[in-house]
Amino acid sequence: MILDFLPGESHQPSFKLKQQFVPGGGIALADFAHQVGIGRRHLFSRERKRLARDTLRAQRRGINHTPQFPAFPDALGIFSPSEYECLWEIQQVLRKCMNDKTKLLLFWVLALSSLAADQASKFTVFHWLANPETRHVHTLFQKGEQGGFHLVAQFQYDVETGQLKKDASGNPIPYVNQGALFGMGGKHQGLANGIFAVVSCGAAMGIIYWSMQKGSLAHTPLMVALAFILGGTTGNFFDRIAFSGVRDFLHWNLWFDWPVFNLADCWLVGGAILLMTLMFFAPKEEKPQAV
């Protein structure tokens, strides 16, 4: 049992409740604090924060540090020294719970920010380059041009009329990649888009489940990698549902010609590289030696 918060204010516990108090009992500690109504601001007093900070510093230096508990604050003077020490232990449990929530918040902020940046960039580039004065209509691979990094908004072209196809609102219809990264499987068009949309949805749900596991919450770099992968996955998934394919607009042809891609692809590749790096350098578990 881990309490996210301890409601109420401090008050005198009954004699029976004190008799039932079990020092160092984990669940009993949290239940005791909950029943007596220890206020959160009392548990997180400046003095106890100092004790936790000193203990953490000692642990990082490899020092076996036993915290010296200070004299009772007036608000907690009703407790014995053993009870006071146990309340300090509860603070450590709550601190860990808050750290997990902070990492989960970081995960969602990065994931949603990546998704927003991807969609905002696609909307901006395709609307800006759809303007006749700034229009750039290129094929997938640019040849014979000076190498560099280009913004390429591709639109569907009507061969018979020689004009760009437009939707009911009069906006040019984007040319989309219905395949995977680098256009793999794109020749199957709608079937490929449907399959990759289902795969993207499943991957997103799997990443969310992975991020909520205790082992993931304890590893900040892993949470960052999963956040970028989720942002890229959902960015392209939205395109597949809304446009029946992925909108690409970034083209690199300096030194070599690279397939057109988008920010979601960058988040996916970057997150995958970080994830593989973490897996490669992960400490190996030591097998117990036979006696």
Image (spheres, rainbow, N blue to C red):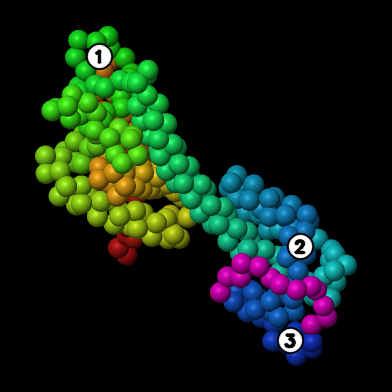
Where's residue 53, x and y in %?
A: 68, 50
Residue 90 left/right relative to 232: right
The residue that label 2 is drawn on is 41
Q: Nearer the viewer, mark 3 or mark 2?
A: 2
Residue 4 left/right relative to 54: left
- Tell me, yes or no, whether the two marked residues, 1 and 2, touch with CB atoms within 8 Å: no
- Where does the C terminus fall, quadrant-wise? bottom left
- Residue at image coords 44%, 46%: 111
Label of residue 24 in the image: none
- Quarter of the rendering containing residue 198: bottom left
Whichever of labels 3 and 2 marks the residue nearer the N terminus, that label is: 3
- Tell me, yes or no, whether the two marked residues, 3 and 2, touch with CB atoms within 8 Å: no
- Quarter of the rendering containing residue 183: top left
Magenta stretch encompasses residue 10: yes
Whichever of labels 1 and 2 marks the residue nearer the N terminus, that label is: 2
Q: How many marks?
A: 3
Q: Secondary structure at mark 1?
A: loop
Alpha carbon separation for disc pair 1 and 3: 76 Å
Q: Which residues are magenta?
A: 1-13
- The amino acid type found where label 1 is placed reads Trp
- Residue at image coords 62%, 54%: 64
Pick whichever, 109 or 24, lies toward us: 109
The residue that label 1 is drawn on is 255
Where's residue 245, x and y in %?
A: 25, 42
Q: Say if 241 sits above or below 119 in the image.
A: below
- Residue at image coords 34%, 53%: 204
Whichever of labels 1 and 3 marks the residue nearer the N terminus, that label is: 3
- The amino acid type found where label 2 is placed reads Arg
Q: Say if 206 sits above or below 264 in the image.
A: below
Alpha carbon separation for disc pair 3 and 2: 22 Å
- Where does the N terminus fall, quadrant-wise? bottom right
The residue that label 3 is drawn on is 17
